[in-house]
Image (spheres, rainbow, N blue to C red):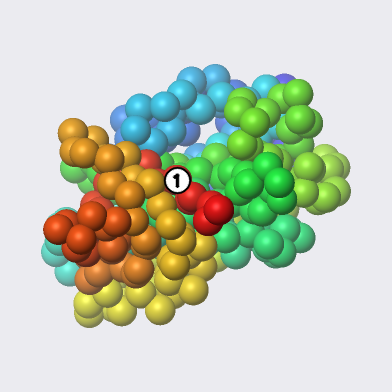
Amino acid sequence: MTIPPLPLSRAVSPDLEWRASCASTNSELVAGAAQRPDLAVLATTDQTAGRGRLGRVWSAPAGSALAVSVLVRHSAPSPSSEPEPRRLGWLPLVAGVAMVRAVRALGVLGAGLKWPNDVLVDGGADGPLKLSGILTELTADGVVIGAGLNLSMGRDDLPVPTATSLALQGVAVDAALADRALAAYLRDLLPLVAQWRAVTDPSELRHVVEPELRTLGRAVRVDRPGLPLLLGTAEGLDDDGRLGVRSSDPVEGLVAVAAGDVTHLRYE
């Protein structure tokens, strides 16, 4: 498979490596993080062993989806060798905002963020449809931010009925689509990472993230690893980037969700 020139993306990132095929861009960057520079980018449109959040498998026909991972090193230019956990908790949210802005720039104006970092569009009677997902992984050398974006999938290619693609959302499919999509994402992600590094208190990023969160104000179901099912209304983000859910059980009150699978519920 010929490696595309990617002029738009290479203009944004000087440390971009494109693979004609790759088992997992995240796994590759995690394994080689010690040798990679800060903000190194690894991308492909043929990922053969992709992984999603909560241990899910992420797969797509070759050429139909973009997989991209970016290494955010602890020591460059952070003053300490590893950011505190509170700061790390905001990085997936910032990456989700970057992808939302990117797909809007590509023409999907109705895109929004589901906590913590799935990009959704309105599917009408079919409910919200997932266009992109993000998986971050912590290493001794830095955080690897992985993102998958469905590019040219038709309906028969979708992994689940609740997914969608740029093509199905009306974005023109041509030979440069992967380059346009990757460049759009990096243009937003890299400045947001710089902002994440620069703020004294990471909760200062709340004003960046919350306006993009479609989860806020919604009735939600939260499946939490090792904890009971939570039903309630999403109210906002706390200082650690956790989702505050007002439980339907008044005894529980406001619950801070650090990890879990959130489903937006419809009001009947």
Residue at far front of view: 268
Residue 109 image-quadrant placement:
bottom right
Q: Which quarter of the rendered picture does the N terminus lie within?
A: top right
The location of residue 196, given as percent across then percent down, is 34, 69
Q: Let me know if residue 244 appears in the view.
A: yes
Q: Identify whether 54 is placed above or below 249.
A: above
Of residue 112 and residue 174, the one placed in the foreground of this image is: 112
Q: Where is residue 135 in the image (x, y as percent from the top left)?
A: 40, 42
Residue drawn at (43%, 66%) of the image: 216
Q: Report x, y in % for residue 29.
A: 38, 36
- In depth, the one of 64 and 157 nearer the eye is 157
Q: Is mark 1 on a helix, strand or loop?
A: strand
Query: In x, y percent, where is residue 17?
Result: 54, 40
Q: Is residue 165 above or below residue 19?
A: below
Q: How busy is the neighbourhood of tag 1: few (under 14 within 10 Å), some, or many (20 plus)?
A: some
Whether residue 14 is visible, yes or no, is: no
Amino acid residing under circle 1: Thr
Give the residue displayed 76% in from the left and 24% down from the top.
156
The residue under the point 40% across, 79% down is 207
- Residue drawn where x is 42% and y is 27% of the image: 56
From the viewer's perspective, tell me whether residue 152 is left or right of residue 70. Answer: right
User: In front: 35, or 150?
Assistant: 150
Q: How many numbered badges does the structure rendering display?
A: 1
Q: Observer-nearest residue: 56 or 135?
A: 56
In this figure, which residue is indicated by the disc labeled 1? 263
